[in-house]
Image: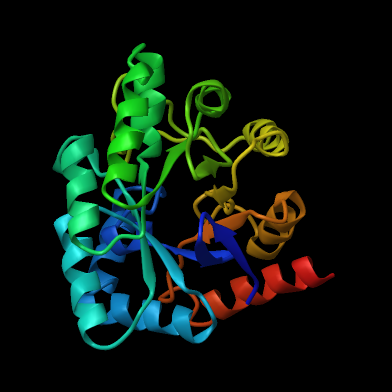
Amino acid sequence: MHYIHIGKIKVSRFILGSNPFSGFSHQGTARDLAMKHYFTAANIKATIRAAEALGVNTIIARTDYHVMRLLMEYWDEGSAIQWFAQTCPEVGDHYACINRAASNGAKACHIHGGVMDYLLAQGRIGEIPDVIQAIRDRGMLAGIAGHNPQVFEWAEEHLDVDYYMCSYYNAAHRDQRAEHVSGMEEWFLDEDRRVMTDLIQQLSRPVVHYKVLAAGRNDPQAALTFAASKMRNGDAVCVGVYPQDNPDMLAQDIAWLASAWDG
């Protein structure tokens, strides 16, 4: 496994994503429900354990009660994966999410990508510097996520953060609603991926690349090889997996990335 540092924290370049654990497939309501049925507490912990065995030391997961309860149980069983927390707008405002993250062991916290897109569209993005300071005041690394490249163009001029979470696809514009809704229309355009990956090369902070597989729509080997080619030395990638489709999915994804990095 390859590692980077974000701030003073050592982070595996492959970060485990957790959207599938909560049934966020971005493939429709039936797929969402199938993921919820598959990802029992036991299967979630088994997936995290398998990731750790492959050298993954970081998970990105929401500040909801489901995630926090599972992580507490997982840590109590003796494992040590570190949590980068994502705010969760349907379970509280920025500050409630930050307090939950800090109180439950998160090493870092970033603002939900849909929220950043929404605040930009609504002309309210100026509230974010105070939120970033609140994350820092609780002793965590601070970041933002986003699907709209304009979020990061604004951030470069107005924010002091430790990392960015950049989605390759602006798959459902969040101008009127920040949260993802199961079954909502989404689109995954090559042009969006090109625009975001071109922008990443100019950004001043480490970037965690995400939605690189277009929520399972892209050929995984080709998509991960492409992502590796766009990742700078201090960048990482966040990928969620669904072992019910392929029990070797996690190991294969990591191997394809390693091959691309080493090649």
Residue at image position (51%, 35%) is: 187
Does any portion of residue 175 appear in the rendered image?
Answer: no
Give x and y (percent) for residue 38: 28, 72
Q: Give coordinates of residue 159: x percent, y percent.
A: 47, 28
Up the image or down, 249 lies above or below 130; here it is below
Foreground residue, 191 or 197? 197
Towards the viewer: 54 or 41: 54
Q: Residue 29: x, y in percent?
A: 29, 49
Tell me where residue 95 sits by quadrant: top left
Residue lying at 72% horizontally and 38% vertically, measured from the top left: 201
| Quarter of the image where the C terminus is located | bottom right
Q: How is the image coloured?
A: rainbow
In the visual, does 23 lie left or right of 50? left
Q: Position of residue 57 (x, y in %)?
A: 47, 73
User: In this view, which residue lies farthest toward the right?
Assistant: 263
Q: Residue at x 47, y 39 (%)?
A: 161
- 130 vs 227: above or below: above
- Residue 106 in sight here: yes
Q: Quadrant of the N terminus?
A: bottom right
24, 149: nearer the viewer = 149
